Image (cartoon, coloured by chain):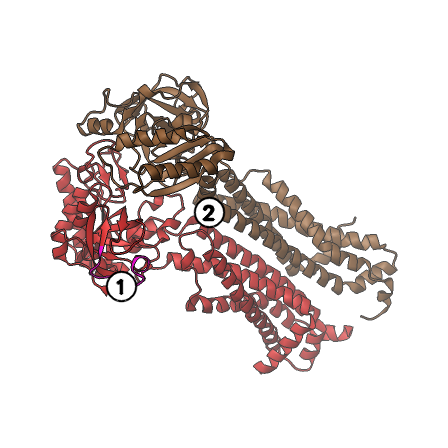
Amino acid sequence: MLAYYLDLALRSLKRNKMLTALMVLAIAVGIGASMTTLTVMHLLSGDPLPGRSQHLFYPQVDPSPDPNPRHQPFDMMDYRSAMDLWSAHRADRQALIARATLKLRAPEVSQPPLMVRTLATTTDFFPMFDAPFRYGQGWNADDDAQRARVAVISDDLNRKLFGGADSVGRTLRLKDSDVRIVGVLAPWRPSPVFYDVAGGRFSNGDTASFYGKPEDVLMPFNTGQDVNADGFDVFTCWSTGGSKQLQSSPCVWVSLWVQLDSAAKVREYAGFLAGYSTQQKTLGRFVHADNTKLHSLMQWLDFNRVVPSDVRLQAWLAFAFLAICLFNTVGLLLAKFLRRAGEIGVRRALGATRRAVFAQCLVEAGLLGLLGGVGGWLLTMVGLWLISRQPVEYADLAHLDASMFVTTFVLAVVVSLLAGALPALRASRVAPGLQLKTL
Amino acid sequence: MEIRPILSSLRRHKITAFLLVLEIALTCAIVCNAVFLISQRLERMHMPSGIAEHELIQIQLANLGLRADAKARTLEDLAALRQIAGVTEVGLASQLPFGNASSNNDMRLDPTQKLATLNAAMYTGQNLLQTMGTQLVAGRNLRDDDFRDDDEVNKAAASGNAIGQAFPQVLVITQAMAERLWPGENALGRQLYLGKTPLTVVGVVAHLVRPNNFSQGTENSIVVPIAMKAGDGSNYLIRTASQDRERVLKAALAKLKALDPKRVILQKRTWDEVRHEFFQDDRAMTGILAGVCLALLVVTALGIVGLGSFWVAQRRRMIGVRRALGATRANILHYFQTENFLLATIGIALGMVLAYGINLFLMLHYELPRLPAIYLPVGALLLWLLGQLAVLGPALRAAAVPPVVATRSV
């Protein structure tokens, strides 16, 4: 039966090639635009650590002297708060993070010095964030405590300096200190670089920079303090002046991530955080005692509105565009089916049920959708290729994965069936008698 | 032209007519808003900076930690750069318009007030105003004796003071900021507090845009006389005639390398490049929006052509009868044109309401201003034109139907 309907549909589509091409093109362009933007949305709004993200939390306290009761805690922590919380070891795993750009040379390789983005963090960083190793491994808690001069480097940097060979044991000169490579990461591209996300609410939707590449050199937090002293990137300061020493300055520049494996532990940690804040208020260091936050990873990304507003706007536009293409297709299909009223009348008179006519029309619409889907898929590939050539941080992420490939065709067929439903219904209502009379 | 027969014939094609109206409405609404978005982006891309953009060069050095003799080296660099033929001014800048990072401060009119009056970007660096070429509208530029060394300022601040000779005493603000702080009054001689430090306004410049963060006031910028050292991430700013920029940039780089071969240069570009790079996202978005508008108009036009052709084909007989009864070709042509005009008008009316709705949504989520009323009549005109152009083909075909068709049975 279906084969017969398909044959009918093909005949009908061939009869007016121009109109068919127009409809397929409309569907293809609509699908292409929507799927391109949807794929980008899918890539940018996904969970960067599926399966683990629900256990990761971002504690915040508020050291600001600003008496405004609506003051939001800063997006990072001052050195003392971060160290206090970290030293308490109340979480299953925890990592301190501070960022800096440093001059780097590899004494064993003859290359001009580079400026590289570095991360000072603690040993749990690697297991907590599932950072994959190609060679060697991370440092351990002793290295953290003993300020060991060790480092883990990215796959990118390893290729650039050592041609991708096993560089464990080699030495790098960071600023004026030597560090020994103990591990090389495998290619790792979390999207976004979630552990670096902060300040999204101040960026006015211009958040593409969260989707850059992870840092090239990672070293123990205390080692970083020795190597780099006061050169870390500062998020903001709550008063000007003060100490020039970063560790005692009125500035926030350290982030703390904690892993809490059960709901009870989350509650316990939130309590600990509140307790710490109250204690600091009694000590006179904090003004806001109750201003603590414990966002989960996904909540934190949401709070920072990580998906760039341009990307969201493009998605809205694309779907509005698809809607217009849909209206267009409905109108054209209606025209097409009703023009064949005579033929449908004959078929009805010969015994075809309304349901059969309806199904025939829908098969034709579905076939259009499938053709439009193929076109849409090709256009999506073109669209993603265009995006990968844009000067945006997430350009290299743009690709069509299997689920999005399937979605393209599902969307195309669903859209065309939707578009075909009304015209098919009208066609199936054709009164056979009236049509036969005019023949 | 009699409208009633058109309406009664449209009533027999309610759904198709309704779809066409809906398509026109949606297109009208989206195109109005998209064009408005484009105009906003264009306005942003052409935001005046207040500086002599076509004459400036930026050279940014990496922060490699300061050496003991950093101050002497900075002076040496500045002197060397000034000697290059064609260079008119050389300055040092902590941050610059259209940069990607920014240093901002809360400003208060009274040091005891709890909430800041406004947030401003703070520019510091020797000879900065003169090099940037800002236009002074009142008072004076900063002088050498206004400047304080950043080390001294930091040392004084670390000891808990906020007032004293170690701190800068004066500042220059923008006209926009003066107007906001003291509307209609003279800003010169007024005091403004940076933290707890009082600064007296000695100059007002016409324009000086902040590095970024435009939502907090595009021109909330202050220039404070603090002298810095190169090598803590600050920028050398060089001014020269616009045709000399490439040559001066090369010479400046060679000089800086000769003075200290070890330093790492992060940025070396003319100001036209700075602007180009800063607004590249906006440019890309403008292109996308324009493309979408065009595609929407084409799709809608195709829809009108498609349905128009269908209706003409369906009414061949009716047209034949009318022609046989004495209607001229022009009558038939006008019939279809009027029909399209009616549908477009309904669509446009609906589209206006929709455009307004979409604008409200955008205002809520994208901090966009209200859609200016002028967009609506222009959008309407555009869609009327589009409709008339699209229907012309089918209408001409209808007009060409010979009267003899009336006598044939399909």
Vertical relation: A339 (above or below) A383: below
Q: CA distance from mark 2 to mark 1?
A: 33 Å
- In the rendered image, residue B91, in percent from the top left (x then y), is placed at 37, 29
If the image is split into quadrants, where does the C terminus of chain A sit? Answer: bottom right
Residue range in magenta is A159-171
Residue at the image position 19 percent from the left and 46 percent from the top = A227
Disc 2 crowd, CA 10 A, few/some/many (<14, 14-19, 20+): some
> Is there any visible trace of residue A391 in the rendered image?
yes
Residue type pointed to by label 2: Asp
Q: Which chain is brown?
A: B
Report which residue position mark 2 lands on. B281
Q: Amino acid at mark 1?
A: Pro
Residue A160 is drawn in which quadrant? bottom left
Is B302 in front, or is B281? B281
Q: Tell me: B2 left or right of B293.
A: right
Which quarter shows the N terminus of chain A? bottom right
**Residue B111 visible in the picture:** no
Tell me the chain of label 1: A
**Which colour denotes chain A?**
red
> Which dot marks residue A132?
1
Under circle 1, the secondary element is: loop
Q: Is residue A170 magenta?
A: yes
**Secondary-structure class at tag 2:** helix
Q: Position of residue B229 (x, y in %)?
A: 29, 32
Residue A113 percent location from the top left of the image: 30, 49
Res A428 → quadrant: bottom right
Between A363 and A88, the one lying in front of the other is A88
